[in-house]
Image (tube, rainbow, N blue to C red):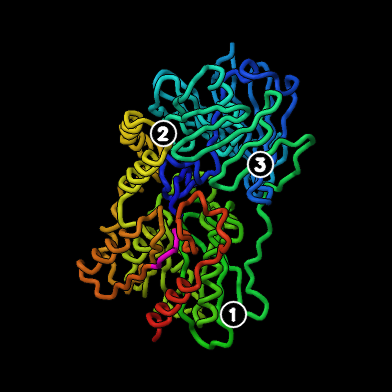
């Protein structure tokens, strides 16, 4: 998907400015909460919270305040545990430390990644430790900006408490998961504090000096304080079956795919039953962010688009190979091999998948198609342009603009939508965007590649039949980009380009009249819309016929 991405953990880009919309909530830390409000608990005791998405328990968080630090343990369901520590001295915040632990790691285990953010004048010094090595980077910021811990709504509420004590209506924040500095605004009424960032509103309800409930209405998210220990959530991924459904007219096979980089990719090959000889096959390519072979999203329950496509195509006589991204699930390539990878590196992984398929006696090597969603719509053309033997390409909500243009547009949308700002404040925010993007491009290899790469340059090199699928309510890859892609390919001489646009379909290819990413988690139907599935299947059956 195209969302904000860090270490390929975010997604090709709903925009640096509105990162929090897709991370579920703004995460911010606070100066001396103990002095700002009546003590919420005895020093050193923990406050427990449960995050609810609708009626589902999404995460738990334990927060402990001492005289020298604020400490937290944040555990989202089926995701790595994150422990954070924000040092305090004389009521002032010092360094913010974030530690990420492998799924299932026990208490006291060694972190797989550690980040230390230290404000220094108009910059933030970032110390990074992973894979046995360390490095240091300097990010531009603004004097007085606080580092922000992402995904924790508790931080939002506690920062609002400090803002109230200091009589602040706004404060600069350094987004640790985006490298950008922006202003949050605050408002207070009775026992409720409201924090707004890039149009996202977070409300905290207070009692006896502590937040007892935090609401993110746009995302149907609540964080509720519980009196006893919060329920234990698994950090290891839930067991997901990739097997074919009972009585399906196709089989499924777990496969292992070698790569020239010393690691293997793991995937599932579905193949039509009762078909003798070699069959055509489609390779699915995920969007940005760590994706399993179904391209699931933790915050959209039941969403598994590549499983939907595999099922539809399997019933139409076409095999599908879907695989875990490098460093994800059962695939190798973890650590630096993933963290430093660009779209070009992921295209090399696609080439390995195609090479593997060509070794199989049950696959027709002349009828292999690539299908990419979002960033996958950038990766698929890279792989197909380098391999003329690829038979066809399907682009699902693929970008036509370079990443910098997309980010500038999305930042502009966020700034325009943010309530409570004057025209002068909006202009001030807009003025920070170019330098923030420059900093991102320098500090993150994936982001640098994404910002500089022109998808049209690759698209013009394609000579295979291409199907472009676009939802008209897509707010991440704007609909006109599909027309731009088609026009560029046709102008370059490709006469086999088909464009299909779907009213009321969002970036996830779901039925959604709004298309706003913050509403994804509340959509009633999380299966790829039937007319999209049917159109793609019809085109592939026609294109891959002998």
Q: Is residue 503 magenta?
A: yes
Residue receiving disc 1: 250
| Residue occupying the point 63% across, 28% down | 191
Q: Is residue 54 above or below residue 320?
A: above
Mark in front: 1 vs 2: 2
Query: Would you say 306 lies left or right of 49 here?
Result: left
Mark 1 → mark 3, Cα distance in angstroms: 38 Å
Magenta segment's dominant SS is: loop
Residue receiving disc 3: 75
Front-most of 517 and 235? Answer: 517
Where's residue 502, x and y in %? Answer: 40, 67
Mark 3 → mark 2, Cα distance in angstroms: 25 Å
User: Any mark on residue 180, and which?
Assistant: 2
Magenta region: which residues?
502-506
Which element carries disc 1, helix, strand or loop?
Answer: strand
Q: Residue furthest right?
A: 228
């Amino acid at each position: 998907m195209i969302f904000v991405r860090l270490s390929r953990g975010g997604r090709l880009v709903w925009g640096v400015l509105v990162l929090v919309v897709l991370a579920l909530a703004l995460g911010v830390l606070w100066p001396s909460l103990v002095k700002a409000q009546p003590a919420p608990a005895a020093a050193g005791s923990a406050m427990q919270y449960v995050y609810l998405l609708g009626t589902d328990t999404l995460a738990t968080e334990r927060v402990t305040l001492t005289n020298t630090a604020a400490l937290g343990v944040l555990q989202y369901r089926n995701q790595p545990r994150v422990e954070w520590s924000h040092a305090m001295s004389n009521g002032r915040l010092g360094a913010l430390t974030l530690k990420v632990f492998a799924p299932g790691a026990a208490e006291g285990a060694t972190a797989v990644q550690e980040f230390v953010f230290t404000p220094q004048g108009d910059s933030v010094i970032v110390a990074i430790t992973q894979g046995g090595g360390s490095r240091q980077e300097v990010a531009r910021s603004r004097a007085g900006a606080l580092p922000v811990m992402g995904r924790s709504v508790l931080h939002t509420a506690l920062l609002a408490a400090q803002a109230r004590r200091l009589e602040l209506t706004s404060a600069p924040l350094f987004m640790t998961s985006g490298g950008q500095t922006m202003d949050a605004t605050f408002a207070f009424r009775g026992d409720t504090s409201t924090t707004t960032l890039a149009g996202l509103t977070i409300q905290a309800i207070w009692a006896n000096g502590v937040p007892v409930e935090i609401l993110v209405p746009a995302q149907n998210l609540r964080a509720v304080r519980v009196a006893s220990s919060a329920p234990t959530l698994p950090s290891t991924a839930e067991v997901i079956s990739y097997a074919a459904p009972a009585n399906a007219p196709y089989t499924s096979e777990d496969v292992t795919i070698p790569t020239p980089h010393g690691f293997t990719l793991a995937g599932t090959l579905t193949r039509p039953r009762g078909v003798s000889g070699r069959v055509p096959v489609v390779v699915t390519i995920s969007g940005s962010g760590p994706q399993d072979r179904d391209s699931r999203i933790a915050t959209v329950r039941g969403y598994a688009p590549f499983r939907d496509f595999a099922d539809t195509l399997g019933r139409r006589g076409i095999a599908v190979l879907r695989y875990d991204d490098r460093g994800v699930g059962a695939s190798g390539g973890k650590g630096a091999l993933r963290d430093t990878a660009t779209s070009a590196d992921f295209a090399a992984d696609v080439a390995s998948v195609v090479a593997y398929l060509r070794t199989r006696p049950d696959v027709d090597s002349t009828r292999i198609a690539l299908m990419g969603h979002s960033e996958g719509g950038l990766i698929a053309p890279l792989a197909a342009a380098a391999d003329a033997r690829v038979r066809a390409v399907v682009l699902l909500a693929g970008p036509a603009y370079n990443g910098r243009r997309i980010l500038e547009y999305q930042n502009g949308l966020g700034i325009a939508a943010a309530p409570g700002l004057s025209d002068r404040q909006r202009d001030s925010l807009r003025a920070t965007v170019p330098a923030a993007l420059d900093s991102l491009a320098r500090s993150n290899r994936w982001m640098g590649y994404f910002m500089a790469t022109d998808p049209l340059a690759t698209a013009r090199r394609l000579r295979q039949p291409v199907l472009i699928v676009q939802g008209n309510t897509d707010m991440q890859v704007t609909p006109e980009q599909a027309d731009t892609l088609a026009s560029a390919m046709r102008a370059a001489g490709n006469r086999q380009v088909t464009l299909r646009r779907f009213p009321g379909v969002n970036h996830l290819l779901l039925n959604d009249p709004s298309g706003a990413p913050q509403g994804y988690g509340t959509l009633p139907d999380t299966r790829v819309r039937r007319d999209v599935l049917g159109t793609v299947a019809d085109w592939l059956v026609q294109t891959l016929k002998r």
